[in-house]
Amino acid sequence: MAPTVTPPSVCVCIPTYQEYESLPRTLSAVLQAVPDAHVLVIDDASPDGTGALADRIAAADPRVRVLHRPGKAGLGPAYVQGFRWALDQGYDVIAQMDADGSH
């Protein structure tokens, strides 16, 4: 009998700032492409309601998590905070993606 192989746990880190319009499309695309992945949205206190939208999406989908940062600190630090969170949670694979889906 062949041993059972457990797929790696995957977390996709997506920093956001004023991404209210693009976030739902990006999250949907990521979760369709990798249904077993979790997504971490790292919001930099977006004044357009992106953080609240991410919370509503997370409340409806247990694969989505949200970190709220107190202010706009930039893309690099947002990724670092997301990577640290994902490492602390024990994910095997950590990926990054821009909120508009461009990278």
Image (cartoon, helix red, strand yellow):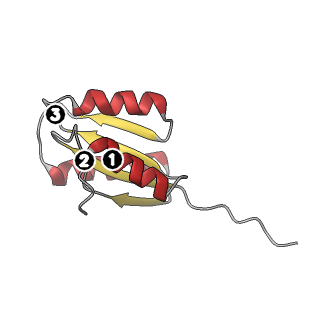
Q: Gap between marks 2 and 3, in whole Å?
A: 11 Å
- Whether residue 27 is visible to the viewer of this picture, yes or no, is yes
Q: Mark 3 points at which residue?
A: 46
Question: Foreground residue, 90 or 3?
Answer: 3
Element class at badge 1: helix
Q: Where is residue 41 in the image (x, y as percent from the top left)?
A: 32, 42
The C terminus lies in quadrant: bottom left
Q: Quadrant of residue 68?
A: top left
Residue name at image x 50 percent, y 51 percent: 90
Q: Earlier in the sequence, mark 2 or mark 3?
A: 2
Question: Foreground residue, 20 or 13?
Answer: 20
Question: In the rendered structure, which amino acid carries the disc numbered 3?
Answer: Ser
Q: Which of marks 1 and 3 is nearer the N terminus?
A: 1
Q: Which residue lies furthest to the right in this view?
A: 1
Q: Gap between marks 2 and 1, in whole Å?
A: 15 Å
Q: Name the residue under label 1.
A: 25
Q: Mark 2 points at which residue?
A: 15
- Whether residue 84 is visible to the viewer of this picture, yes or no, is no
Question: In the rendered structure, which amino acid carries the disc numbered 1?
Answer: Arg
Q: Which of marks 2 and 1 is nearer the N terminus?
A: 2
Residue name at image x 32 percent, y 34 percent: 54
Q: Where is residue 3 in the image (x, y as percent from the top left)?
A: 79, 69
Q: Do the residues labelled 1 and 3 touch (CB within 8 Å)?
A: no
- Name the side, left or right, on which 9 lies relative to 71: right
